[in-house]
Image (cartoon, rainbow, N blue to C red):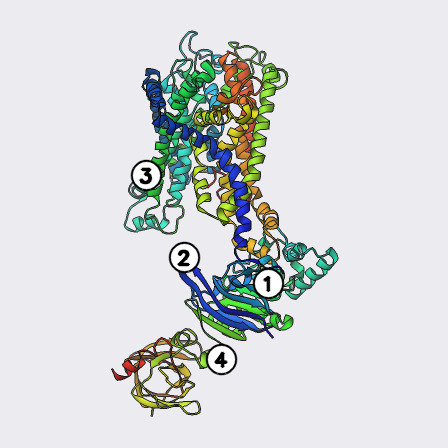
Amino acid sequence: MTALPANSISRSSDRLISLLLLPVILIALGPILRLLGEGISVGTGAPLVHAAEVLTRPSTLTALQHSLVTAGAGSLISVLIGSAFAFVVALTDIRAKAALVFCLMIPMIIPPQITALAWMQVTGPSSVLLKTLGIAPPLGSPQPLYSAWGISLLLGIQHASIIFLTLRAGLRMIPGDLVEAARIAGARGWRVWAQIVLPLSLPSLAAGAAMTFVTALGNFGIPAMLGIPARYSTLPTLIYQRLAGMGQSVLAEVAVLALLIGMVAIAGVMMGRLFLRRRSYGLVGLSSQPLSLSLGSKRPVVETVLWGFIFCTLVLPLLALVSTSLIPAYGVPLTFESATLKAWAEVLFRQPVTKRAYLNSLMLAASAAVILMAVSIPLAWIMSRRPTRLTRAVDTLVDLPYALPGVVLAISCILAFMRLPFGFTLYGTLTIILLAYLSRFLVVMLRPVQAAIGQMDPAMEEAAASSGARLGRRLMDIVLPLSAPAAAAGAILVFLTAVNELTVSALLWSGGTETLGVVIFNLEDSGDTVMASALASSIVAVVIGLMAVVQLSASRLPKGTVPWQG
Amino acid sequence: MAGLKFCNVSKLYAGTPALDGINAEIGKGEFVALLGPSGCGKTTLLRLTAGFEVPDKGRVTLDDRVLADGGSFVPPEDRNIGIVFQSYALWPHKSVAGNVSYPLEVKGISLSERKRRVAEALDLTGLTAFADRSPAQLSGGQRQRVALARCLVADPRAVLLDEPLANLDLALRGAMQEAFTAFHQRTGATMVYVTHDQTEALALADRVAVMEKGRIRQFAAPEDLYDKPQDCFVAGFVGDGAVLPVRDASAPAAGHVRINVLGQEIEARSQTLTPTHVCVRPEQLRIDAEGPISGRVTACTYQGGRFRLTLAAHGATLITHAPVRASIGDELRLSLHRPWTFCDPSASASAPVEAHA
């Protein structure tokens, strides 16, 4: 038995905290803080004139207006779709809810540039699907998706699941007895929905709408694929085009643009938080399924409508994408004779660029997942068991790199890692992309692990301490095995998101460090639609497969680990 | 023998004292219960003994070795104290045998020795048949026994139990109480048992420390707590009955004192020179046709074999037992038989004023 000075129990874990928090703060928060620092110096010194000049340029104002219009209209569409699904799934007795929710989540996980590519294969004069069916519009007629409406529609479909998830979570927090009280007062099903459930769920809906707006604002893949051909720029595509066209000489200018979009996004996040806080007011009581409306004879109709919607927004575009990938050359209709796997073989086995991109993306995603898993378990443990003002600040700030638009993070990373001491630079290497991924996806990994450790009875660790196990041993023997399932689910989510990432890598890649997202975008940009479709189809298969793995293991994971399960 | 000793131990939480000058000595092999309402500090005292909390002041020693005082602190890992948590805290990823053998693994004990001791601990708690099950497959009582086996296997110098029966149903509680007693007799371990259930505390423990607001109000054998409470809190918290202020006490002699209570002069037991209150247990208040006190029945509840009557008499509320049902509003004659008087520390200052009022 060794006696220690009384204050050393806190000191020994303090050492662990500083060891871990330092790299986390440097890598996860450093770039964003660096950009904010840039913003402050812009706001005070001579560069203010430059910033004002950039901000008042017609191209900036047009792009800002386009961003607000498409993100706004897209959010509205998301609200319509997401809330319809949320109310029906949460409040009625339709069948096969799990399958429906799973299908609704797929558009969120499929990368936006693939969504755009797939939809482009549904509409327009050269659609293989329409040609095969013989209903394609005449050649030369415009692609209807190359417009503000097209961008808004796809943004709306892509982000509907955000509304769905927040609203469903809000609905689950409504105490069941509020509804029971209304029924005792004589109100029936629909009246209860309109007068009790709907008003109580409005704050969640508004919070979800704010989150959707911020996400749509940062979306790069959809406006890049649909807007650039139509010369319709949003802020992210404007930044991309300036940086791709002019190189590092415009860094100061795009930093101003990044700050602008960051500002708009932060305003959106703040609004969302405000609504979410309001949601917690006064709702005390046992929460349960608030309402179980029996649809009766209308149930098959409602189910048909919902599944029909899933077919139109998910199955149809993917079908079009796959059919395009199976033709020998763009423009040839798909028949049993013309169908070929040539493009698949080309992208998967022959083309050095696509092979390299696969390798790069898989390696980046796997490294990010593994590193974040190793960091997240002790980090989440510290945040939960040894909270300090610093850990609480990290807990709040760690959302930033993920919530802010990807272009903002990319610009931040360029600023932070371009000129390191001793003339060293990371610009143009895979490392800078990896660092950006670590920063962006830390929160994706951290939250499930936090949920797992939060649900863990602290007495489990105390029992181990009483058994003589010291901190390191307790983390290995007790915390690690118990949080491992959540960490694995988080790692798969990180992998899924990182392997398809476009926005950050579009600004950070250079020859040799292409990612899958970049290559699909470039293939389509240079007219290789068939190869782009084949590559995209193979990625969709990987994505849906990984999602299925998570879904199937959901019952063994702690509550709150799988984002689309509640 | 010196078991566990607390010297002037205090602990503050955000400025308010959770423990306020605790002084107590628990003998080696003694079974002690810490009893009190929630928030009284009993769990804090237990966690402080285990080493999960650091005292702000005072000293804790075990077998004459200092566990914590102003300058030094032995972390929980090095104390060799076993603890059974209210939630049992069984590790769900380990089997029953895995849970029980973990403390031995940490201590680096050889595999053969480990197997022998795990088998012994499982046998002692009647769990041999469940060795390979996972904790999730066990019932509440079985999980409780796994937690007990896990804490015993390392041969701890003291066993701490934090409301171990709170999550069990009534029937199982009785069975587990017997199991604890039998276990204590077999191992002779020093045991500290936290509970808010006085029946449990009085039934199990050699001595009970009644706690309130971070202080030990009385630390005595169960029968003494019931029969000779030292202050109003203990008298009211432990056992049934009424606590009444005393007037015009005579000088006590040979443990007896004549006091004026409910308008009567009666004889009471006392160990204090200045009794301020009297504790009247139901069996000390008898229904007696010749009795000098008149009381009106205000409530009557059946308690199995007898009725518990609440009576209003001289502006006080009294409790007694009756073999037959009484109707509310009935007037009964009552007599008092040797109740216990004590001097309540907080009331002693105001007692003389009250006496003249």
Q: Which mark is residue B14?
A: 2
Please state which of the two labelled residues, at mark 4 or mark 1, is closer to the viewer.
1
Residue A205 pos. (x, y %) = 35, 36
Chain bearing tag 1 is B
Labelled pair 4, 1 in contact (Cβ < 8 Å):
no
Q: Earlier in the sequence, mark 2 or mark 1?
A: 2
Q: Chain of mark 4?
A: B
Q: Amino acid at mark 3?
A: Leu
Q: Secondary structure at mark 3?
A: helix
Marks 2, 4 in one chain:
yes
Residue A412 at least partly seen: yes
Report the residue marked by disc 3: A202
Residue toward you, B201 or B220: B220
Residue highlighted by disc 4: B223
Q: CA distance from mark 2 to mark 1?
A: 28 Å
Element type where label 2 sits in the image: loop
Label 3, label 1: how far apart the Cα atoms are:
53 Å
Mark 3 and mark 4: span between their CA atoms?
Answer: 61 Å
**In this figure, what is the number of numbered marks?**
4
Task: Looking at the picture, tell me which residue is in the foreground, A555 or A390.
Answer: A390
Q: Which residue is mark 1?
A: B81
